[in-house]
Image (cartoon, rainbow, N blue to C red):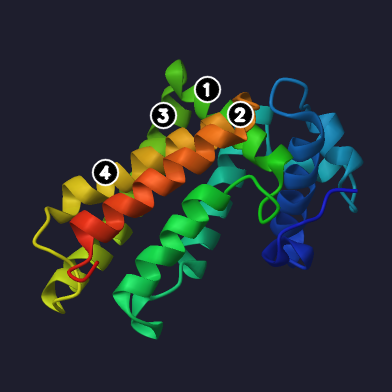
Amino acid sequence: MTELPQFLENPGGTRGAIMSATYAALCKHGYSDLTIQRIGDEFSKSKSLLYHHYDSKDELLLDFLEFMLDEIEGQIPAYQDGGVDDHIEEIVDQTFGFGDAATSTEFTQAVVELRSQAAHDDDYREYFSRSDRFIRKHIAHTIRSGIEQGVFQEVDPQQTAALFQNVFLGTMVLRVTNNDEEVLEDSRAAFERYVREYLLVEA
């Protein structure tokens, strides 16, 4: 049985129940083998509700992605809760931990499949472009705050945020398409060295 993220365990409302069912079905079947019928198999309410709200699998999945982005925006930890350097360390942990024990490997695989749809589907491309902008904005804001507090060196926040994001995306794809764990370990070691030597004021 697929383990749901905490915010999907008791989401409330019809839409929340549909999102939980979509997550479970996506992890189980992946994008290419996913159908509304299979989402309905995970749905605790009448399957007719799915067809009432959504005309196609992709319409449902795009709403699911919007739902996930809303949750991510609400759950990203505020750097004010600790030092900005601690927050950057947390971002690094999340970057290299996405798809391991902390996050369902099946879900990571599904996200990579969904992202690949953006290569030829404008709706998916628009969604991922918007979610990428949000992530870069958050990281850039954290880096800018660290510079103001004298914790980070005078780097370009936007360029550094873009680097963080590219490392995250590359890590996610490698984790689900490559069996070589050593390359991920080496990448993390090199990226942590970059953070220590080129971002933090005190190594």
Q: Along the horizontal axis of the image, is 9 left or right of 120?
A: right
Circle count = 4
| Distance between mark 3 and mark 1 Cα atoms | 8 Å
Of the residues under marks 3 and 1, which one precedes in the sequence?
1
Q: Nearer the viewer, residue 69 or 45?
A: 69
Which residue is identified by label 2?
180
Give the SS element for disc 1.
helix
Q: Residue at x 89, y 52 (%)?
A: 45
Residue 99 image offset from top left, x and y in percent: 63, 45
Image vertical order of residue 171 relative to residue 155, above or below: above
Q: Along the horizontal axis of the image, is 79 left or right of 12?
A: left
Which residue is identified by label 1?
117
Residue 84 image offset from top left, x and y in percent: 30, 74
Of the residues under marks 2 and 1, which one precedes in the sequence?
1
Mark 2 residue type: Asp
Mark 3 residue type: Arg
Of the residues under marks 3 and 2, which one precedes in the sequence?
3
Q: Which numbered dot is residue 125?
A: 3
| Distance between mark 2 and mark 4 Cα atoms | 25 Å
